[in-house]
Amino acid sequence: MRIQGLAGTAVSVALVLSGAVRAEAEIRTDRLSGRQLKTWKAIVAVVEAAGPDGQILHPTLHRLYRELDSSAHAVRIVIPDTKGSSAIAGRFRIESLGSDGRHEASITLNLRTIDRVLTGSPDAQLVTFERLGRAERYAQVLGHEMAHAAWTLGDAENTRLVVDVQRRSLELARRAQTEGVAGEGFSEAVRENERLVRSLEGPALAAEAAITEELRASR
Ligand SMILES: [Zn+2]
């Protein structure tokens, strides 16, 4: 497997670190430590892997990455450096809405969780990680979250919906803490929120299925 585009990535990373050009739009890695940056580069190598004739091996993954990296929005990569592991392998979040329509979002990758064999609910993860290498597993989860990002940021109506779901989720968490879960209408509100959250999974699961096939085929 020949790796393409590593030099280009290094340039982009250097620009972000120096706070120079393009700081307002792209995939940002400025919060990653040296070690995390190394892992990130291994993931990007999977994204940009090419075959002997120069053909991109994982086109769905590659397209999503290019789409986000060249969008008007900024997507920051977050890799928590915690000892314990979260139940969530990856997460996409809108962090702030720009009045000019350029938004800031984040993709969190919980590497420790991805390292373990996922045994979570079947609709949270479409395909298990069988027979994939470590960086490929990370790339698979990244692909799922990038699909959320592309769908959410690609259309103003979608952005509004996701912001609304995030706001509802926060509000429900706050209510659970202050009023408890027995409050009037609480369980209905939780069910409605869960329905909305599930409805957002469609595009991400479809992209993940395609990416998994591409990763398998290239092994
Ligand atoms: Zn998802």
Image (cartoon, rainbow, N blue to C red):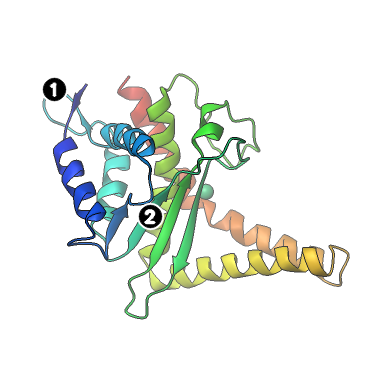
Residue 27 vs residue 217, the one in the foreground = 27
Q: Residue furthest bottom?
A: 99
Question: Residue beneath label 1, please?
Answer: 52
Residue found 25% across the figure and 30% down from its top: 57
Q: Residue furthest left?
A: 53
Where is residue 150, by image quadrant?
bottom left
Residue found 33% across the figure and 49% down from its top: 29
Question: In the image, is residue 148 above or below residue 142?
Answer: below
Amino acid on which disc 2 is placed: Arg
Compared across the picture, whether 68 is left or right of 53 comes to: right
Where is residue 19, by image quadrant?
bottom left
Question: Residue beneath label 2, please?
Answer: 76
Query: N-terminal of the two: label 2 or label 1?
Result: 1
Please state, as top left, top right, bottom left or bottom right, where the N terminus lies in the image: top left
Amino acid on which disc 1 is placed: Pro
Q: Secondary structure at mark 2?
A: strand
